[in-house]
């Protein structure tokens, strides 16, 4: 008898789960904004020039007027392995978030659409060829906010 109750409850939960709309749609920004992915950083600037990032902000959001604040960005001060640099960021109330960096030829790393009632708390690992800035820009309440952190990438994992 217990087995029948268990199977009945399982079937009921499955029916409820199937009836609940839970579709998640992702925007393919490589198709939607192809010019953004062609924006390059100045390799001669050794990760210090923000021109590519600023150009990408304008191409993604339509404006390059950003304010500091409302974004919590966590990245290491020193990354001993530039192939896997952990980056975590939060932007409560964000509708769209862009992750960029100045250490590689391509300025834009990723663009995220935050669904309604979504929790914009992301942890990713990015690749950095050299020391440079990690920049997160988020659209919150119609305004753009930015967080920026310099990550030193060491050669050979020497830590200094």
Image (spheres, grey):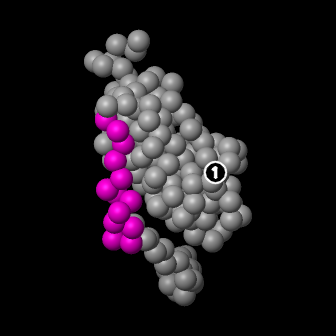
Give the camera-side residue of 55 and 141. Answer: 55
Observer able to see residue 3: no
- State the residue at coordinates (54%, 87%): 19
For residue 95, above or below residue 19: above
Horizontal arrangement in the rendering, residue 79 relative to residue 114 (left or right): left
Q: Quadrant of the C terminus?
A: top left
- State the residue at coordinates (65%, 46%): 71
- State the residue at coordinates (38%, 59%): 36
Q: Quadrant of the N terminus?
A: bottom right
Horizontal arrangement in the rendering, residue 29 relative to residue 112 (left or right): left
- Few, some or many C-alpha atoms within 10 Å of disc 1 (few <14, some 14-19, many ≥20)? some
Q: Is residue 124 magenta?
A: no
Give the camera-side residue of 20 and 70. Answer: 70
Helix, strand or loop for disc 1: strand
The quadrant holding residue 85 is top left
User: Over which residues does the magenta segment extend?
Assistant: 31-43
Rendering coords of residue 73 (x, y %)? 59, 40
Q: Does the magenta stretch include residue 35?
A: yes
The quadrant holding residue 138 is bottom right
For residue 13, above or below residue 115: below
For residue 144, above or below residue 14: above
Rendering coords of residue 137 (x, y %)? 57, 51
Give the camera-side residue of 121 and 19. Answer: 121
Rendering coords of residue 54 (x, y %)? 50, 48
Residue under label 1:
66
- State the residue at coordinates (55%, 83%): 21
């Amino acid at each position: 008898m217990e087995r029948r109750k268990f199977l009945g409850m399982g079937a009921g939960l499955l029916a409820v789960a199937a009836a609940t709309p839970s579709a998640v749609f992702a925007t393919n920004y490589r198709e939607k904004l192809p010019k953004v992915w062609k924006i390059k950083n100045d390799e001669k600037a050794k990760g210090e020039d923000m021109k590519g990032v600023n150009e990408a902000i304008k191409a993604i959001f339509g404006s390059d007027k950003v304010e500091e604040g409302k974004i919590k960005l966590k990245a290491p001060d020193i990354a001993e392995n530039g192939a896997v640099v952990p980056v975590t960021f939060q932007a409560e109330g964000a509708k769209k978030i862009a992750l960029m960096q100045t250490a590689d030829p391509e300025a834009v790393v990723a663009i995220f659409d935050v669904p309604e009632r979504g929790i914009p708390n992301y942890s990713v690992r990015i690749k950095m060829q050299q020391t440079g800035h990690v920049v997160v820009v988020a659209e919150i309440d119609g305004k753009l906010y930015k967080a920026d952190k310099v990550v030193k990438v060491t050669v050979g994992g020497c830590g200094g």
